[in-house]
Image: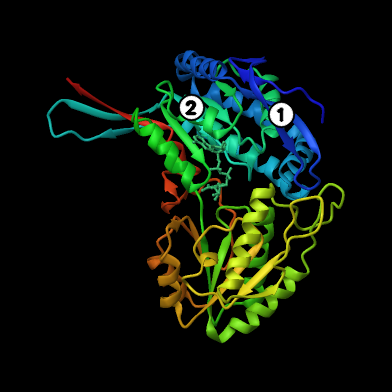
């Protein structure tokens, strides 16, 4: 890739670099591109362009806004295979998953476009004679979307599509790890008729471009996906201006496996969940609580599947199940956490080593004999490592699951409807999967409790996060 990337501001590609960032293929450490880090002036221009465009965009009928969104999704479909290759090279996920990411992104944009004819308000009954009251949904204004690297392409759409269909304009800042796919997204947006300034792209590090966006008085809503520490920093910056925030943060998803579970189903679901995107998914199982009666049998099945997982460079070896971690920091963090678990008395059943290769690979790893106080059961790993703790019953499992600073997703494997419903009642998480793992529906609602975030995404409720309510009273 020798492409010369530029920011996309006010419908134009602009050359305005404060410095350059190197982007590497995590499977090979090959330099993919040197991309510009936006200057402070360019960020100002992007916010001003979004502000200028917002007034007329809001007045554009929603059904026309939907038409522009559908032009974008059509472009993504047209370039599907090329985009998937770019995502894999830049981020490291296997090609099959990168293709799913492109497809899901296009479908998500279309799904949000469908809301055009359903952005309804409400009519209320009044206590006063002759009075009419209604609630109107209005856009918030200029949205800043700050993104992580794990689903870099889809997350652009998760921010952009609901923002635009509800009449907001947006400035996107991708992760400095994965800006190339965002530039490719912007290039396709530029080929549509979307009015200038409605979608803008700037790039750069969190400490510079990210913090400029989150402390800017010209931004009305910050929608952020990323880690808890960054979410806290963004909220602190936003608090200075009382800017609204929507925070989708980290997870430590518990999976409960009871004695009556279908163990083959549970083992497959858990291993798939842990190796997808090399374990770098916020809603995938990060800790297992297995009931004593099936602990050995489950461990055996998990170990066999993890040991059979093929990993490597997803471009050179397209049949691998798993690619590398995104960078050295991520790979070293996983290695350090596994070593600490070992030192704390946990047992590494399979895996547990850095792979000697050019990329940031780590072996698929099963850890048993974990206890509740171990770091491996409490902190987000974000790698292909599955730690398991034995419990005596469903109550103990639920109590341990809830004893976490995270509250994003959770799962339970059981054939007993009463145990499943007890978990649904008592698990304090935004989502619970029963006899399956991860993958949210776009019509659902993805939201974390506790430090996993504030607000949520997807579906009607996610859409409403991009609106404000205006109440109108009319006395006749
Ligand atoms: P990160 O927090 O390191 O970075 C995310 C983004 O924030 C990047 O664009 C970065 O440049 C920016 N940033 C960093 N410092 C900033 C600052 N001071 N001000 C403004 N912006 C700043 O996260 P990451 O490593 O890219 O992503 C991994 C994390 O994302 C994991 O914790 C994962 O669980 C989480 N995640 C959550 C969800 C969800 O829906 N809840 C989805 C995907 C990923």
Q: Is mark 2 within 8 Å of ligand 1?
A: yes
Instruction: Give the residue drawn at x 66%, y 55%.
Output: 332
Instruction: Give the residue drawn at x 57%, y 68%.
Output: 435
Q: Is residue 297 above or below residue 308?
A: below
Residue extending farthest bottom: 293
Residue where numbered disc 2 is placed: 213
Of marks 1 and 2, the one in the foreground? 2
Q: Position of residue 368 (x, y in %)?
A: 60, 76
**Is residue 467 found left or right of 4 in the rendered image?**
left
Number of labels in the image equals 2
Instruction: Give the residue drawn at x 50%, y 75%.
Output: 371
Label 1 and label 2: CA atoms lie apart by 22 Å
The quadrant of the image that shows the N terminus is: top right
Residue extending farthest front: 343
Q: Is mark 1 within 8 Å of ligand 1?
A: no
Instruction: Give the residue drawn at x 79%, y 43%.
Output: 29
The quadrant of the image that shows the C terminus is: top left
Ligand 1 location (quadrant): top right
- Mark 1 closeness class: few <14, some 14–19, many ≥20 residues within 10 Å: some
Q: Position of residue 387 (x, y in %)?
A: 59, 69
Q: Position of residue 78 (x, y in %)?
A: 76, 32
At numbered mark 1, what does the secondary structure look like: helix, strand or loop? helix
**Is residue 419 found left or right of 69 in the rendered image?**
left
- Closest to the observer, 105 or 246: 246
Q: Are marks 1 and 2 in contact (CB under 8 Å)?
A: no
At numbered mark 2, what does the secondary structure look like: helix, strand or loop? helix
- Closest to the observer, 316 or 212: 212
Residue where numbered disc 1 is placed: 184
């Amino acid at each position: 890739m020798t492409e010369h990337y530029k920011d996309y501001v006010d419908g134009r590609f602009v050359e305005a670099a404060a410095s350059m960032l190197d982007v590497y293929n995590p499977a090979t450490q090959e330099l993919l591109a040197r991309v510009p880090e936006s200057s402070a002036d360019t960020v100002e221009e992007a916010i001003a362009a979004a502000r200028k465009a917002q007034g007329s965009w809001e007045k554009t009928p929603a059904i026309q806004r939907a038409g522009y969104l559908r032009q974008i999704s059509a472009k993504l479909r047209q370039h599907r295979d090329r985009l998937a290759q770019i995502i894999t090279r830049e981020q490291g996920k296997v090609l099959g998953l990168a293709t799913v990411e492109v497809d899901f992104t296009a479908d998500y944009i279309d799904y949000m476009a469908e809301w055009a004819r359903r952005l309804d308000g409400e009519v209320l009954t009044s206590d006063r004679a002759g009075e009419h009251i209604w609630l109107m949904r209005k856009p918030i204004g200029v949205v800043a979307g700050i993104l992580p690297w794990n689903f870099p392409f889809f997350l652009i759409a998760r921010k952009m599509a609901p923002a635009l269909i509800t009449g907001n304009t947006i400035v996107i800042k991708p992760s400095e790890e994965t800006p190339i796919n965002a530039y490719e997204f912007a290039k396709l947006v530029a080929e549509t008729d979307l009015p200038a300034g409605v979608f803008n792209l700037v790039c750069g590090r969190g400490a510079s471009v990210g913090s400029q966006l989150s402390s800017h008085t010209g931004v009305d809503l910050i929608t952020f996906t990323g880690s808890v520490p960054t979410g806290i920093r963004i909220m602190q910056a936003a608090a200075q201006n009382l800017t609204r925030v929507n925070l989708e943060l980290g997870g430590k998803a518990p999976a409960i496996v009871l004695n009556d579970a279908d163990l083959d189903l549970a083992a497959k679901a858990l291993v798939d969940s842990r190796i997808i995107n090399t374990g770098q998914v916020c809603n995938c199982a990060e800790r297992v609580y297995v009931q004593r009666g099936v602990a050995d049998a489950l461990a055996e099945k998990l170990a066999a599947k993890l040991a059979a997982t093929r990993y490597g460079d997803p471009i050179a070896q397209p049949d691998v199940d798993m690619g590398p971690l995104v960078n050295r920091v991520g790979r070293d963090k996983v290695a350090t956490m596994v070593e600490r678990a070992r030192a704390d008395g946990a047992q590494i059943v399979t895996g547990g080593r850095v792979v000697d290769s050019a990329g940031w690979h780590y072996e698929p790893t099963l850890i048993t004999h974990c206890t509740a106080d171990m770091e491996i059961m409490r902190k987000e790993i974000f790698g292909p490592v599955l730690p398991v703790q034995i419990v005596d019953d469903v109550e103990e499992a639920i109590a341990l699951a809830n004893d976490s600073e995270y509250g994003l997703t959770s799962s339970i494997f059981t054939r007993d409807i009463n145990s499943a419903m007890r978990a649904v009642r008592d698990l304090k998480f935004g989502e619970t999967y029963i006899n399956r793992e991860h993958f949210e529906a776009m019509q659902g609602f993805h939201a974390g409790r506790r430090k996993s975030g504030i607000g949520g995404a997807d579906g009607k409720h996610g859409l409403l996060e991009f609106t404000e309510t205006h109440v109108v009273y009319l006395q006749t």
